[in-house]
Image (cartoon, rainbow, N blue to C red):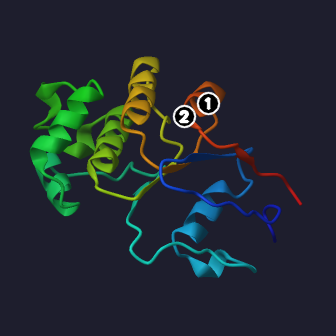
Amino acid sequence: MTLNQPITFELKSGQRQVLLGPNGYGKTTLIKAILGDTDLVINGTVNYPSKLKISYLTQNFEALSGSIEAYAASYSIELPSLLNMLRKLGFERSVFTADLRDLSMGQKRKVSLARSLCESANLYVWDEPLNYLDVITRQQVEDLILKYQPPMLVIDHDRNFVKAIANVPVIELKRP
């Protein structure tokens, strides 16, 4: 079954593209196809430079476990950079030593966001980054995006967030 109409877009350096659409319309599937799952592409192609480095923020992060230090190491991120980014997202220092398994969903989301923001990438692909976040943290994420201006492909439903971060026309997925 085809989930949506054919889509064509070009994302250039510094641009932040947002995909909108109701749940079940294939936004995450489209992201997975863009990230290289060619089994999901019925026809057409996904083209990007061979040296493109992508930082992917999945919407599934519930299984995080272990120490923040081990998590940083598994992504080749300097621990002080990750901790600094977590502080920018309002993370309490007292939680830095906790097992990630014991964190709330909002705290796990912050760890995932901080990891992505610390990765050196040419493109940041975020699938519903605001899930489980409080209003203050949502604003902090928006502020960080606007400050650092990373090139992004984002799925989100928060119209205010989308309006604030998108700097090219939004792509709205619809049934064919």
Foreground disc of the pair 1, 2: 2
Q: Residue furthest top?
A: 136
Residue 172 x, y percent position in the rendering: 76, 47
Secondary element type, mark 2: helix
Residue visible at 24% across and 39% down in the picture: 102
Quickly name the residue at label 2: 165
Residue visible at 60% across and 80% down in the picture: 38
Quickly name the residue at label 1: 158
Secondary element type, mark 1: loop
- Compute the Cα span from label 1 to label 2: 11 Å
Tell me: 34 left or right of 60.
Answer: right
Choose between 105 and 125: the one closer to the eye.
125
**Looking at the image, residue 51 lies above or below residue 6:** below
Dot 1 amino acid type: Asp
Classify mark 2: residues with Cα within 10 Å, few (<14), some (14-19) or many (20+): some
For residue 35, which numbered disc appears in the image?
none
